[in-house]
Amino acid sequence: MINLDWDQLPDAEGHFGPYGGKFVPETLMHPLEELEQAYLEAKSDAAFQAELDGLLREYSGRPTPLFFAQRFSDHLRGAKIYLKREDLNHTGAHKINNCLGQGLLAKRMGKKRVIAETGAGQHGVATATVCALLNLACEIYMGEEDMRRQELNVFRMQLLGAKVHGVSSGSRTLKDAINEAIRDWVTNVRHTYYLLGSVLSSHPYPVMVRDFQSIIGRETREQILTKEGRLPDVLLACVGGGSNSIGLSYSFLKDAKVAMVGVEAGGRGKALGEHAARFDGGKPGILQGTYSYVLQTEEGQIANTHSISAGLDYASVGPEHAYLHDLGRIQYTAVDDGQALEAFHSLSRLEGIIPALESAHAVAEAMRLAPRLGRDRIIVINLSGRGDKDVQTVSQLVSAR
Amino acid sequence: MRPAADGLPMTRIQEKFRELKRQNLKAFIPYITLGDPDLETTHQLVLGLEKSGADIIELGVPFSDPLADGPVIQRATERALRNGFSLKKGLQMVSEVRKRTALPLVLFSYYNPLFAYGLSSLAKEARSSGIDGFLITDLSVEEAPVPLGLIKETGLDAVFLAAPTSTEKRIEKIARFSSGFIYAVSRTGVTGMQESISEEVRPLLDKIRAHSNLPVAVGFGISEPGQVQEICRVADGVVVGSAIVRSIEENLGSPHLAEKVGDFTRWLKGGG
């Protein structure tokens, strides 16, 4: 087992081992320093934390339940499966944990305008929601391909008062939305807060987003100890940028006996461009502010990606995941579109819980893993979001068959 | 070559600024994207720009995700990549054109294509094909020490950006790491044409000069002869990117593309 002091990561410049750091145009460098300073002050300010805790509880409905999925477990004839019900948060996904934190920070920094990127639309909806609550102007960048497959979320953001900008460059998905959001930020940086949705980009974002999401793991730890009197054997979460996975895992990193699996999108094939499995086909590189694993060509051009779930459809992954991967602390695996769909249907029928297609990737991994483990083993799946937004996509796929 | 203050031989970039200064002239620095729309055209453009009065040329390496660029340079990048650009072929073109010109050439790039190539061998190959300096848009001074060592040990200049948001402390570091010249970004934002020069230029130049004796070139948003003159009054050089790339775009398919872009460049420079 690796003997590392996890609390010492990242270093002062935001490095997790060799990964992370700050790779942005000079114009953004001092604003990132200001953001880091403001975040560190807020982090140690009891009043800020109390306000955040209050909103998480009263507005988002935390703590979210840790639900024992009895029928699903029985069906798989193996380990006991618990679902961390992040889908029961206000707005239907874990994204709001981070948005409430960063929204309060934006306010504290005196910024009046918030921008964000979104893939599946869950982060965009959570950002628009928090901006409505905190009276901040909100503009969201979203790839046109994602707008098409997550139409409902586009309308939801508009209802909440946000302006949604379609992005037509590149593969018209999350990566392109981030490029456009950064272009906006570099232009309007003095009065605009960039509310990034995952553990990506330059320091301090990967740390800050992890910290705001780590409430998932802190609650899970307490809940499983109450229910089972011991820690789980395996934690499962899907990994797009990696915020729900790190949020669940962070509080357990020091517990050597707790295994962790991060599930990437296997898409529809192994070839470059057909999937978003960065740890199975990517290599270290620099994209959108950070050094991490990146799906790219020999020439260092960023590859297009594919996944049935917009939220996992991204060419890079959070730098802390890159380091955890190299250390072997989290095992990364991939689930393809078909397996994710099957899991989507299974959980819906067996538990009456429709998972987001992103979270369905973690559910699919549990379906492979649980039968191989004894009935005395415990798996916790981070059910990071609910599937309402995906019902249309799935119904089209079902009728196309 | 004459030795510079640090004992190393002077680079083409350093020589050029020195020569211009002696004549009381300012550097006119066009940017074009390598391989836009193909490398043969880039070759012609370099020679054409030299005839039209370019003092230094910035050659942009196309990258799939140019997050610091506006739409004009984004489209140039897409054209180059669609036509099969590779850095290896780009450097071959540079070594060809180097036989016909002594103009300083700066490789302008996002970090990842250089990193994927392998910076150590790239710096050597770039140097031997006739590149004189590197400017890496998304390489902050914080992350610079290792790549900077690899660039400088080959005798290439490393140019860093200073921005209106840069603090004194950052500018001090930028000045320390830069050689050849410092590139001052005229305003917050991405590359692209603007109607007027930002009021932030003057204070930024003052801040840079308080920390460095290096020449300072100003870029971002400069697209008219009046703006070029205005910048030349206060800086040591002026970089024009999007306006020239747009001129390339407007003349795509013309057999006289290089001449037309040359005419436009002469007009920009104020020569007719």
Image (cartoon, rainbow, N blue to C red):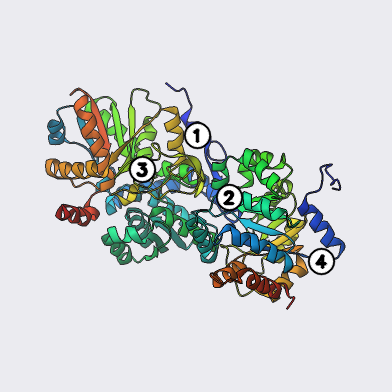
Q: State whether discs 1 and 2 lie on one chain.
A: no
User: In the image, is residue A298 above or below residue A400?
Assistant: above
Residue A129: quarter of image: bottom left
| Callout 3 crowding tier (Cα within 10 Å): few <14, some 14–19, many ≥20 | few
Q: Residues within 10 Å of mark 4 (few under 14, many from 20)?
A: some
Classify mark 1: helix, strand or loop: loop
Residue identified by numbered label 1: A9
Q: Amino acid at mark 2?
A: Lys
Return the residue at label 3.
Answer: A271
In this rendering, is residue A25 above or below B53? above
**Total marks in image:** 4
Label 1 and label 4 in one chain: no
Rounded to the nearest whole Å, what is the CA distance between mark 2 and mark 4?
34 Å
Q: Earlier in the sequence, mark 2 or mark 4?
A: 4
- CB atoms of marks 2 and 4 within 8 Å: no
Foreground: disc 2 or disc 4: 2
From the viewer's side, name the closer residue of A245 and B144: B144
- Residue A105 in the figure: left or right of residue B18: left
| Residue A3 pos. (x, y %) | 46, 22
Determine which of the numbered discs, if any, sits on residue B25 in the image.
Answer: 4
Q: Secondary structure at mark 4?
A: loop
Label annotation for residue B89: 2
Q: Which mark is residue A304?
A: none
Which amino acid type is shown beneath numbered disc 1? Leu
Amino acid, disc 4? Leu
Q: CA distance from mark 2 to mark 3?
A: 25 Å
Q: Secondary structure at mark 2?
A: helix
